[in-house]
């Protein structure tokens, strides 16, 4: 790795060079805490289970603004498929290539350098500044941000505004930002039948045959029609399995796993009741369990959204469009506390892919956007 001359790119390189595959932080957080301590932040390491997190806070007055992010990354995959080693943090033709460059070590580097420049100009802001960093976003997400939020609640600390640095841009830097996300709920369903010989179906009970009409009706449900901010809620069957592998055996069970991505028009209770009613209608003997990954959330138009849009327009010359598309993020753990949560980061075109990358110019501009946001918040809090 040849260190870049720009502070944001150099910090991003330092982070990418640490192979912090979930949940291993690989030394990223000590590096960040050292930079933030030098800026006057009080840093609190928070380890839950095998997951490293930290909370950093600076200031004594005004609303609390928090930068949130994760240092963990997904596995690199086939090393031979990469054009450069995934953790070499290599700049090629003005592009930083490496695992985590876009998701989301580049954003974290931009946050830190934005704070360094802002605090050099405004050493005593009219609002409090904080960082919430985890190494469990790409994994099961049970000992990361959700546990830090619980800890903050026990400390009596409440976040007013939160910017999550997830890669939100679609075609150009800053063209979109996330004002919310859909919720996610997974059903693990077992339809019970009776195993038997295919030549003697009267002595067996085929759960696949019984479940087929139920599944057809389930996948045809219109859960809602969405609203001005969200598309309609959708259901997808993710896994389905039955049989012993033999062609002369009627299976005794059918296992089905399906997931719903749902908006603010539909609740978990609605989903569970409609599925229960449908199972009863088809008189299926079954076992059903649910796993909720997160509730939907939405940050409505207000001072924080306006500050985001103004900051992006100041640096890019265009106003970003709000979006709720995509999967879940750690914003789902922060928003229920009452915080206004926005996601704004680099292009998402290469995240989790071979040769994940971000243009150097984009990270430099992203740091400027974050700094402009801090200026906007200062103007509103003063």
Image (spheres, rainbow, N blue to C red):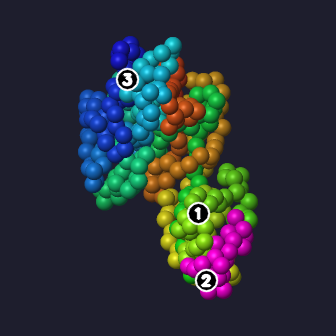
Name the quadrant containing residue 135.
top left
Q: Which residues are magenta?
A: 195-219
Residue 174 inside the magenta-drawn segment: no
Please rate how many residues cluster around mark 1, counting C-alpha atoms within 10 Å: few if below 14, some from 14 to 19, many from 20. Answer: few
Q: Position of residue 347 (x, y in %)?
A: 56, 31
Residue 202 in view, yes or no: yes
In whole angstroms, how far apart are the C-alphas of marks 2 and 1?
Answer: 20 Å
Q: Which of labels 1 and 3 is toward the front?
A: 1
Against 291, is 308 above or below? above
In whole angstroms, how far apart are the C-alphas of marks 2 and 3?
Answer: 59 Å
Residue at label 1? 240
Point 34% across, 37% down: residue: 20
Q: Position of residue 337 (x, y in %)?
A: 45, 57
Determine the residue located farthest toward the bottom in the rendered image: 203
Residue at label 2? 204
Residue at label 3? 88
Q: Position of residue 194 (x, y in %)?
A: 57, 81
* Of callouts 2 and 1, the N-terminal one: 2
Q: Which mark is residue 96?
A: none
Q: Position of residue 30 (x, y in %)?
A: 26, 35
Looking at the image, which is closer to me, 44 or 261?
Answer: 261
Point 53% across, 43% down: residue: 342
Looking at the image, which is closer to me, 311 or 246?
Answer: 246
């Amino acid at each position: 790795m040849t260190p870049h001359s720009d502070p944001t790119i150099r910090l991003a390189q330092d982070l990418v060079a640490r192979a912090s595959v979930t949940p291993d932080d690989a030394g990223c957080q000590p590096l960040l805490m050292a930079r933030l301590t030098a800026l006057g932040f009080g840093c609190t390491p928070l380890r839950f289970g095998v997951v490293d997190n930290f909370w950093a806070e600076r200031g004594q007055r005004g609303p609390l603004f928090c930068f949130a992010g994760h240092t963990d990354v997904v596995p690199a995959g086939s090393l031979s498929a990469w054009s450069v080693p995934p953790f070499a943090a290599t700049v090629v033709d003005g592009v930083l290539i490496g695992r985590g460059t876009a998701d989301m070590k580049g954003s974290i580097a931009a946050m830190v350098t934005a704070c360094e420049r802002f605090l050099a100009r405004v050493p005593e802001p009219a609002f409090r500044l904080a960082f919430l960093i985890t190494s469990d976003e790409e994994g099961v997400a049970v000992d990361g941000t959700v546990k830090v939020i619980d800890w903050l609640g026990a400390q009596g600390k409440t976040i007013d505004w939160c910017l999550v640095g997830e890669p939100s841009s679609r075609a150009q830097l800053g063209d979109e930002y996330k004002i919310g996300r859909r919720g996610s709920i997974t059903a693990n369903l077992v339809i019970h039948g009776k195993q038997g010989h295919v030549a003697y179906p009267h002595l067996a009970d085929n759960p696949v045959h019984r479940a087929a009409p139920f599944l057809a009706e389930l996948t045809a449900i219109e859960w809602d029609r969405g609203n001005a901010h969200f598309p309609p809620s959708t259901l997808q069957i993710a896994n389905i399995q039955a049989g012993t592998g033999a062609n002369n055996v009627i299976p005794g069970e059918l296992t089905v796993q399906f997931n719903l991505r749902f908006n603010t028009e539909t609740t978990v209770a609605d989903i569970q009741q409609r599925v229960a009613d449908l199972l009863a209608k088809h008189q299926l003997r079954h076992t059903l369990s649910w796993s909720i990954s997160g509730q939907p959330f939405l940050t409505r138009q207000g001072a924080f959204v306006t500050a985001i849009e103004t900051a992006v327009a100041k640096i890019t010359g265009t106003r970003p469009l709000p979006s709720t598309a995509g999967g879940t993020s750690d914003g789902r753990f922060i928003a229920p506390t009452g915080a206004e949560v926005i996601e704004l980061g680099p292009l998402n075109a290469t995240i989790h892919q071979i040769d994940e990358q971000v243009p150097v110019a984009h990270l430099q501009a992203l740091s400027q956007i974050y700094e402009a946001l801090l200026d906007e918040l200062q103007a509103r809090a003063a």
